[in-house]
Image (cartoon, grey):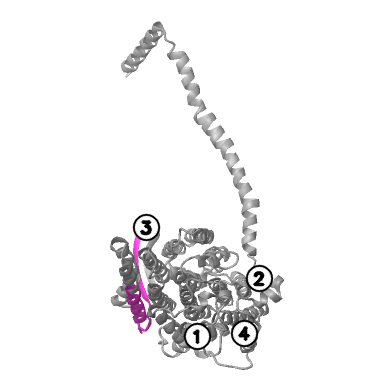
């Protein structure tokens, strides 16, 4: 690859960092200027990523050593292959449109400068993960993503729930990152390198250790909100809606899937089997829990959990190319759904309860059209973006003979159509359920333009565009499953999809109750309560109160008894005190005759030393 393409990657990576630095130094109080600087840098980066995506040359490789420990070299570098090119385009393109949406959404926010600087830092961090050529550089940017997401979720830091949500996201991700850093240490001690290409070339005869893949996968479990570290994702809705779109659509949660595809050759088959089962279970659980949410953003957050589970299942089935394909398609329609939710919230004067909406199809036609188009893609309607990847993964599960995973994915597909139909019915159809919905208005062009591009463009035609417009040399692995997709009425995935769509149509009628009422909660309150209850949060709360706190109290008691008592007071302080007491009794008695004797003895001792020499 020529030097020009290396400079292109330099530009893609450093543009958002330069924008963040400029805003921090010069534009902290100039919110409007800061927003356009950040948005301009994002669009330029998207243009550079598109140039790199459509290039016919090979992979981009660049490396610079920053330290050497014996024979171990540590450094930074780029490895931009076909997978990285796709991820670069998705992150920069969707990120740029989210920036543009934020210009309108955050127009009245007094802290716009800080918000857009945080967006730029976030973009820099996620792009660093995408282009990294080694595990150390990946981990550094991995932590930067965690830090910048913490800042963005806590944008409204004066609100208790936002501060608590940001802390929760930060702490839960650190649990996963502990395993990640232990995996780095294990890899370095066992194989002496962290370079992806060097590790791939090693290929140990006995296979890669199970522990290595399991430890590295801990980072994926935390960042991509897989069971049991999924509890932070729905709470992250406390941040501004553009942050929710950025975290849940194409960037932070997708980073874990991309990372697993990057290190797929390191993963043991037994680990992949566990990932497949866990991912399929997460897909079913997330889809069902979305049925018991009244907050529009939290319902979409559970939808994201379901799709992340589908991607994880694809990885576990040994199909990383399908996981990356679904990551790209999901980015388009899920970003549209979150931005559409933000437009609805903005138009309804910051109302987020779906039971207080209704009738918005007539009042917000552009938002409604984009949202419904993305919803159809989310439901995997044939030949829309989501169908090309989601049905391919379900089909792969059936043909792999994985009955449990296939059944759970089928449940997820049905649940997707149910909660999507519920959302459309409660938000856009029927009559307004509140004054906020009755006086709703369409959003400004900076918010509707990204909806049109993502919702009416890529959510509908993303699969066709990827199959027909992207060069085969660029996306050989990714384009292959798209080109092979066809509508087969007898295929298991097609049957599941048609049943799910039929049940979705039934859900439109089922939820056609009076405005402000939820049919599932009224007719099946126990089912609704089971789906609404945060079981894992309760389990973690019990663990902290009943186990961890008691262990901490025991450790604190031992600290006071042994370290503070025995070590500090008895040894570190007691011995010097005893010596001081003895010296006071022997040398400082207050008698001139004793002082003269000790002085004479000291002079004789010094004289003896000098004469002995």
Disc 1, disc 4: CB below 8 Å?
A: no
The magenta region covers: 40-67
Position of 478 with respect to 117 (left or right) is: right
Magenta residue check for 42: yes
Crowd rating for badge 2 (residues with CA inside 10 Å; few <14, some 14–19, many 20+):
some
**Residue at numbered disc 2:** 531
Inter-mark Cα distance, 1 to 4: 18 Å
Inter-mark Cα distance, 1 to 3: 64 Å
- Looking at the picture, how far across and down is residue 113, in whole percent? 35, 65
Residue 555's place in the image compared with 102, above or below, is above
Q: Which mark is residue 508?
A: 4
Crowd rating for badge 3 (residues with CA inside 10 Å; few <14, some 14–19, many 20+):
few
Disc 1, disc 2: CB below 8 Å?
A: no
SS label for mark 4:
helix
- Looking at the picture, how far across and down is residue 250, in whole percent? 46, 74
Which of disc 4 and disc 2 is earlier in sequence? 4
**Residue at numbered disc 3:** 68
- Looking at the picture, how far across and down is residue 385, in whole percent? 50, 85
SS label for mark 2:
helix
* Residue at the spot 32% in from the left edge and 68% down from the top edge: 34
Inter-mark Cα distance, 2 to 4: 20 Å
Which of disc 3 and disc 4 is earlier in sequence? 3
């Amino acid at each position: 690859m020529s030097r020009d393409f290396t400079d292109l990657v330099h530009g893609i990576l450093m543009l958002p960092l330069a924008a963040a630095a400029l805003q921090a130094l010069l534009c902290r109080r100039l919110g409007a200027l800061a927003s356009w600087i950040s948005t301009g840098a994002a669009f330029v980066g998207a243009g550079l990523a598109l140039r790199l995506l459509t290039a016919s040359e090979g992979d981009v490789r660049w490396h610079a050593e920053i330290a050497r420990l014996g024979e171990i070299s540590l450094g930074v570098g780029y490895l931009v292959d076909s997978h990285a090119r796709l991820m670069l385009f998705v992150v920069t393109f969707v990120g740029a449109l989210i920036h543009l949406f934020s210009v309108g959404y955050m127009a009245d926010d007094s802290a716009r400068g800080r918000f857009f600087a945080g967006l730029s830092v976030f973009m820099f961090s996620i792009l660093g993960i995408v282009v990294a050529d080694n595990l150390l550089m990946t981990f550094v940017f991995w932590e930067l993503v965690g830090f910048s997401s913490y800042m963005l979720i806590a944008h409204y830091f004066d609100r208790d729930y936002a501060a608590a949500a940001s802390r929760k996201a930060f702490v839960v991700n650190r649990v996963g990152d502990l395993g990640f850093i232990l995996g780095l240490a294990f890899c370095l001690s066992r194989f002496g390198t962290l370079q992806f290409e060097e590790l791939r070339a090693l290929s140990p005869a006995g296979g890669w250790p199970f522990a290595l893949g399991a430890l590295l996968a801990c980072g994926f479990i935390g960042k991509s909100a897989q069971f049991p570290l999924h509890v932070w994702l729905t709470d992250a809705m406390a941040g501004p809606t553009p942050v929710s779109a950025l975290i849940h659509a194409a960037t932070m949660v997708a980073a874990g899937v991309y990372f697993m595809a990057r290190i797929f050759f390191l993963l043991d088959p037994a680990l992949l089997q566990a990932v497949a089962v866990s991912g399929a279970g997460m897909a079913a659980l997330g889809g069902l829990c979305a049925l018991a949410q009244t907050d529009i953003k939290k319902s979409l957050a559970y939808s994201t959990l379901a799709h992340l589970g589908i991607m994880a299942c694809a990885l576990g089935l040994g199909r990383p190319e399908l996981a990356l394909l679904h990551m790209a398609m999901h980015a388009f329609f899920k970003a549209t759904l979150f931005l559409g939710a933000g437009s609805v919230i903005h138009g309804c004067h910051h109302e987020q309860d779906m039971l207080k909406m209704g009738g918005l199809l007539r009042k917000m036609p552009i938002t409604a059209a984009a949202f419904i188009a993305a919803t159809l893609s989310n439901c995997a309607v044939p030949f829309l973006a989501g169908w090309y990847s989601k049905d391919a993964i379900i089909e792969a599960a059936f043909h792999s003979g994985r009955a449990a995973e296939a059944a759970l994915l089928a449940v997820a597909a049905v649940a997707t159509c149910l909660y999507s139909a519920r959302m459309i019915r409660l938000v856009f159809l029927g009559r307004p359920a509140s004054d906020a919905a009755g006086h709703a208005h369409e959003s400004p062009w900076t918010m509707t333009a990204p909806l049109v591009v993502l919702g009416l463009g890529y959510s509908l035609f993303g699969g066709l565009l990827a199959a027909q417009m992207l060069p085969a040399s660029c996306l050989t692995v990714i384009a292959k499953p798209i080109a092979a997709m066809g509508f087969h009425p007898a295929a298991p995935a097609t049957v599941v999809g048609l049943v799910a769509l039929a049940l979705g149509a039934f859900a439109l009628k089922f939820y056609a109750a009076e405005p402000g009422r939820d049919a599932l909660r009224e007719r099946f309150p126990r089912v609704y309560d089971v789906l609404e209850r945060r079981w894992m949060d309760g389990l973690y709360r019990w663990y902290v109160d009943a186990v961890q706190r008691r262990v901490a109290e025991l450790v604190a008691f031992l600290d006071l008894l042994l370290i503070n008592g025995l070590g500090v007071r008895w040894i570190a302080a007691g011995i010097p005190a005893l010596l001081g007491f003895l010296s006071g009794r022997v040398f400082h008695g207050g008698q001139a005759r004793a002082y003269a004797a000790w002085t004479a003895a000291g002079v004789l001792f010094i004289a003896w030393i000098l004469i002995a020499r």
